[in-house]
Each structure stands twice: as C-alpha cells, then as structure tokens.
Amino acid sequence: MDSTNQNLQYPRNRIRQQLLPYLAANFNPQVESHLSHTAELLRAEVEYLEQIAHQLRLQALTKCENGDLRLNRHLLKQQPLALQRRVIRQILQEALPQTPNFDHIEKITDLINAPNRSQSDPFPGGSIAIVENASIVIQQPILTPREKES
C-alpha cells in the first residue's frame, strides 16, 4: 500500500477520506456510486467529442509551406461552441510550445466571427492569429538564423 494514501496534505486523500464520507452521511448515501456513473458517462462523451473534433480539424485545417496554419472559419462558424473550442485546442497543442489554456483557445474562438484583419495578441512562442477573409491564419514566428540553430 502507498504510504501517501493516508497523508491529508494531498487533496485526493482529503476528498476520499473526508469529503466523500461527509457527502454520504449528510446528502446522499450513494454519492460514490453516482459520481462513478457520472464519470463514466463523461469519459464516453469526451471520447466521442474528441473524435468528432479531430474529423472537423482535418476538414478545417490547412498547413502552409511556411509553417503557418490556416483555419476555415466559415466551417468552424457552423459548429457548436464546444466543438469549435475542441478543434482549436487540438490545433494549438501542435502549434504552441506549451499546453494551451482557456485564454489561448478563446483568442482564436473570438476570431471566428471577427472582422477581416482582426488579430490576436501573441501566444507563447510568438505566434499570432490573424483573420484573412474566410480564414484564420496562425502565423508562426519568424526565427533568425541564430534562433533556428538553437
């Protein structure tokens, strides 16, 4: 048995040892079962949405020769917000040097309905997103020869 399982400094242990028993005693004796079922439902739904988003990403994304990424914003505009965000998150996971956060995703989501030539402020690593007519272009930063070597 892992000795850290008893250490209440870890939130997971406080949840398991304090919160769940409290919820069962004071609200619903079946709380663990209900949470387990909800987690399973959500896992299946997330898996399904990720598959749909992946297919949509394949349709909406074009990779340019210079490394820029071009998104079909009209295709994205037709989709529910949940799918827009998932597609954008998947794209940014490839384009950014770090995992995208909510604000990074919203920068591009906001551009789906923005006027032509609108643009985001820079992302980590220096990329920016610009509306070019029917597309959102994620422009990769231009590296100097010295930066390319490192």
Image (tube, rainbow, N blue to C red):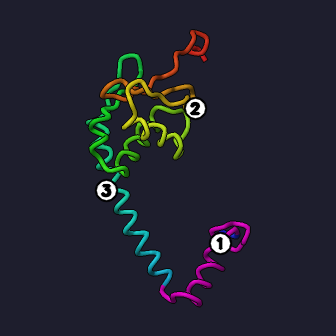
Residue sitting at 60 percent across and 84 percent down? 21
Residue matched to label 2: 124
**Are the residues flagged by discs 3 and 2 in contact, CB closer than 8 Å?**
no
Q: Please give the name of the residue rendered at 31% of the width and 56% of the height, measured from the top-left corner.
A: 48
Q: Residue 48 carries which label?
A: 3
SS category of the residue bearing label 1: helix
Q: Which of 132 and 5 is in front in this view?
A: 132
Coordinates of residue 123 in the picture (x, y in percent): 55, 32
Q: Distance between the residues labelled 3 and 1?
A: 30 Å
Query: In x, y percent, where is residue 12?
Result: 62, 68
Task: Say what amino acid the circle numbered 3 marks.
Answer: Tyr
- Magenta span dominant secondary structure: helix
Under mark 2, the amino acid is Pro
Give the residues in magenta.
4-30
Label 3 close to label 1 by CB (< 8 Å): no
Q: Point out the frontmost of discs 3 and 1.
A: 3
Q: State left or right for residue 89 relative to residue 134.
A: right
In space, the residues marked 2 and 1 are separated at their CA atoms by 34 Å
* Residue 69 placement (x, y as % from top left): 39, 27
- Residue 13 among those drawn in magenta: yes
Q: Mark 1 points at which residue?
A: 13
